[in-house]
Image (spheres, rainbow, N blue to C red):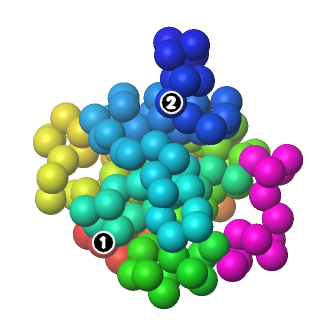
Amino acid sequence: MRQILNNKTGSPLEDLMLEEFLEIGLSPKLQYPVDIFFIDFAFPDKKLAIEADGFKYHSPKKDNYKNKRLAELGWKVERFAGWFLHKYKYVAVSQIALKYFMEELSDKQKKLAMGSIANCLARNDKKLAERYIKSLSKTL
């Protein structure tokens, strides 16, 4: 599967995230062009941009400019640091699914996404669980 994914995404870090999107049943557009940028994962119908920020290719100055410009064009931007995706890729994707796609998710997809919360709590990762629940409480 890795070989196939490398042909679609911009990096191995994005491969990790794409695997989770596909697992939960969401199919983002990859390397989607908007203005002068390419968005790692885009859901154009929702004007939702998701960025996987690996240490090597990102800088706060460039990322802030991109965020600002995309916002001016009406896009919502969600960014996830590489270290976070390596450790919690399933949480990042579940957060996106529940925050932006709740009405469109099947019961099975909702259970998969909500299972991420249970995993965080079971691991006693209180900071992450609190952040996740706070984010979700705005949507539910």
Foreground of the two, 87 or 124: 87
Quadrant including the C terminus: bottom left
Left or right: residue 109 versus residue 59 is left
The image position of residue 12, as x and y in percent, is: 67, 30
- The boundaries of the magenta stretch are 54-65
Foreground of the two, 46 or 83: 46
* Element class at badge 2: loop
Q: Quadrant of residue 63?
A: bottom right
Q: Earlier in the sequence, mark 1 or mark 2?
A: 2
Residue at the spot of label 1: 139
- Residue at (76, 71) in percent of width and height: 62
- Residue at (36, 29) in percent of width and height: 23
Left or right: residue 15 versus residue 57 is left
The image position of residue 112, as x and y in percent, is: 32, 37
User: Would residue 129 be visible to someone looking at this image?
Assistant: no
Query: In this picture, is 90 found above or below 41?
Result: above
Indicate the amino acid at tag 2: Lys
Query: In this picture, is 37 found above or below 22?
Result: below
Left or right: residue 105 versus residue 128 is left
Task: Reply yes or no: does residue 105 show up in magenta.
Answer: no
Q: Nearer the viewer, mark 1 or mark 2?
A: 2
Query: In this picture, is 54 found above or below 1?
Result: below
Q: Residue furthest front?
A: 36
Rate crowding at label 2 as few (under 14), some (14 to 19) or many (20 or more) other CA atoms within 10 Å.
some
- Residue at (36, 31) in percent of width and height: 22
* Element class at badge 1: loop
Q: Residue 8 shows which numbered tag?
A: 2
Query: In this picture, is 122 found above or below 5?
Result: below
Total numbered labels: 2
Foreground of the two, 138 or 47: 47
Q: Residue furthest bottom?
A: 72
Task: Reply yes or no: does residue 58 show up in magenta.
Answer: yes
